[in-house]
Amino acid sequence: MSRRARNPVPAILALLGVASASLAAPPSPVTSLPQLGPQAAPQDVLHCERQYEYRRKRISCDSPLGADGEGLRPLLDSVPESRAELDLYQANRRSTEMLAYTGMAGLLAAILGPRLLEDRGSKNITVSIGLTLALGSFAFGRSRLATNEVHLDRAVQHFNRSNPGDPITLLPAGAPPIPEPSR
């Protein structure tokens, strides 16, 4: 007794909700295209919001690569104390990158440890150590980045003390535009 193979296409189309009659019908002509509203401009994902005001101009505080304060360097280089604080700020930010790798290693240990180990006790220890590494790295990194902002503030304060007639003002994120001077 031979079994005849059936064509699976109609069953697949039925599951997908496509009627087989609609496949045989010629496509209907398009009568009108849908109307599109105004399109929003794409957001620049590398744009940093921190800005400063200097001589009535708003200038980005950071480089396009991240929140590194590099936009302030041309001004702060003229004051040695400011330059030292900016260098310390940037060095601390770079050193926190290691915390990201440590946290990732912890997550990998927590995820892969139970799959690779056979002993239940070893699995629990691996998960505990991995999660502790991940959460500890995250918490320490966040606190270090928050306290590191003090160095950028100090750099601006040193500059402003050296140049009282021409200060830098760090603006909060989302600050309104600087009004044009009246003439």
Image (spheres, rainbow, N blue to C red):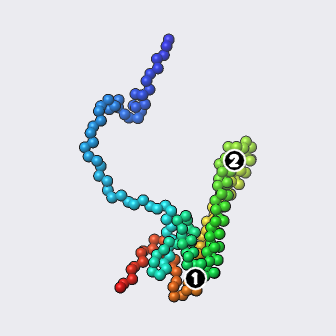
The mark that comes first in sequence, 1 or 2, is 2
Nearer to us in this view, 87 or 96: 87
Disc on res. 113: 2
Amino acid type of the residue tagged 2 in the rendering? Gly
Task: Give the crowd class for mark 1: few <14, some 14-19, many >=20 residues within 10 Å.
Answer: many
Q: Residue furthest left?
A: 31
The residue drawn where x is 54% and y is 68% is 63
Amino acid type of the residue tagged 1 in the rendering? Phe
The residue drawn where x is 54% and y is 72% is 71
Q: State which quarter of the image contains the C terminus.
A: bottom left
Q: Which residue is mark 1?
A: 159
Residue 83, compared with residue 43, is above or below; it is: below
The residue drawn where x is 48% and y is 74% is 59
Residue 12 is at least partly visible in this image: yes
Residue 4, compared with residue 109, is above or below; it is: above
Residue 172 is at least partly visible in this image: no
The residue drawn where x is 52% and y is 80% is 168
Give percent across and percent down for residue 121: 74, 47
* Quarter occupied by residue 105: bottom right
Give percent across and percent down for residue 104: 64, 55
- Classify residue 96 as left or right of residue 58: right
- Whether tag 1 and tag 2 are in contact, CB under 8 A, the answer is no
